[in-house]
Image: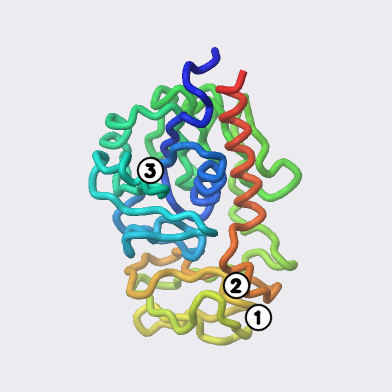
Amino acid sequence: MKSEKRVEELVVLIRGAGEMASAVAHRLYQSHFKICMLEVSQPLAVRRKVSFCEAVYDGEKEVEGVRAKLTPNPEQIHSIWEDGKIPLLVDPDLKRTKHFLKPDVLIDGIMAKKNLGTQINDASLVVGLGPGFTAGKDVHLVIETNRGHALGKVIHHGAAEPDSGIPGDIGGYTAERVLKTMKKGIFHAHKDIGDKVNKGSVVAVIDDFPVIAEISGVMRGLLREGIEVKKGVKVGDIDPRGKRELCFAISDKGRAIAGGVLEAILYKFNQ
């Protein structure tokens, strides 16, 4: 059934404000939707230069010309929209903001590989990014997030491809380009995003335990300084292509997923 609202008047609530959720938010903002984002109190984004969740720490965050602003309560959402920014709230269970906004669209962009509480009756259209959701069961539509021929595909029935546990291939490298912790502790960076790194160099330490680069390239992503991390957490991402400018740009994967979300919304409301 066609919505009584014009498509551009639809309110879209996005769970998560990491890299992929931010790519979606950026695309929908540029398409003139009313966007609101929700995050946890201590986000662990690695691709921080293209993740709106950094607003949780800094108050505001700009990604490719679009700005998100942290707000402590839903009552300020409309004034932030009037300022041309995306409101972002720390509201991980979404209930407080959902009840205030009554969104037309809910997008689960947490990328947790499982459903953390999103329900199909949360909005007129509920979309899940990646594995952990089943179209027609806990969400209306699912967007494929695995790299490959189906990346960004809108799935109307069933689920996305299961998580392979292997990072996507960039420049011929997969797991080697991703840096993970070997112990629990406080993260201290020895490099910054955009810096060149050589194979074998120390990129960061967890307390006094080194995180060592397995390949050469540029630091595409790096965890925020001083964050407490658990063993096995992703703390960095090296791009072997060596192009510094790509560290500050939304990825091809993010743009493909965002395109799938835009298609899903238009499929539902532009009939």
Q: Please give the label number shown on residue 238.
A: 2
Instruction: Left or right? Give the position of 96 relative to 116.
Output: left
Residue pictured at 26% horizontal, 43% vertical: 76
Circle 2 — which element? strand
Whether residue 228 is visible here, answered yes or no, is: yes
Ranked by sequence position, the earlier of labels 3 and 2 is 3
Q: Nearer the viewer, residue 241 or 185?
A: 241
- Residue beneath disc 1: 216
- Judged from this view, the residue extending furthest toward the front is 82
Report how far apart the C-alphas of labels 3 and 1 lie in the structure. Answer: 42 Å
Cα–Cα span, label 2 and label 1: 7 Å
Could you tell me which residue is drawn at 32 percent across and 63 percent down?
Answer: 57
Label 3, secondary structure: give it: helix
Is residue 78 depicted above or below 165 in this figure?
above
Q: Which residue does the numbered mark 3 point to in the structure image? A: 81
Say which amino acid is labelled 2.
Ile
Q: Residues within 10 Å of mark 2 (few under 14, many from 20)?
A: many
- Nearer the camera: disc 3 or disc 1: 3
Q: Is residue 1 above or below residue 142?
A: above
Point out residue 231 in the picture as x, y percentages from the top left corner. Answer: 40, 66
Rendered position, 58 above or below 22: below
Quadrant the N terminus occupies: top right
Residue 240 position, x and y percent, is 68, 73
Is mark 2 in CB contact (under 8 Å) with mark 1?
yes
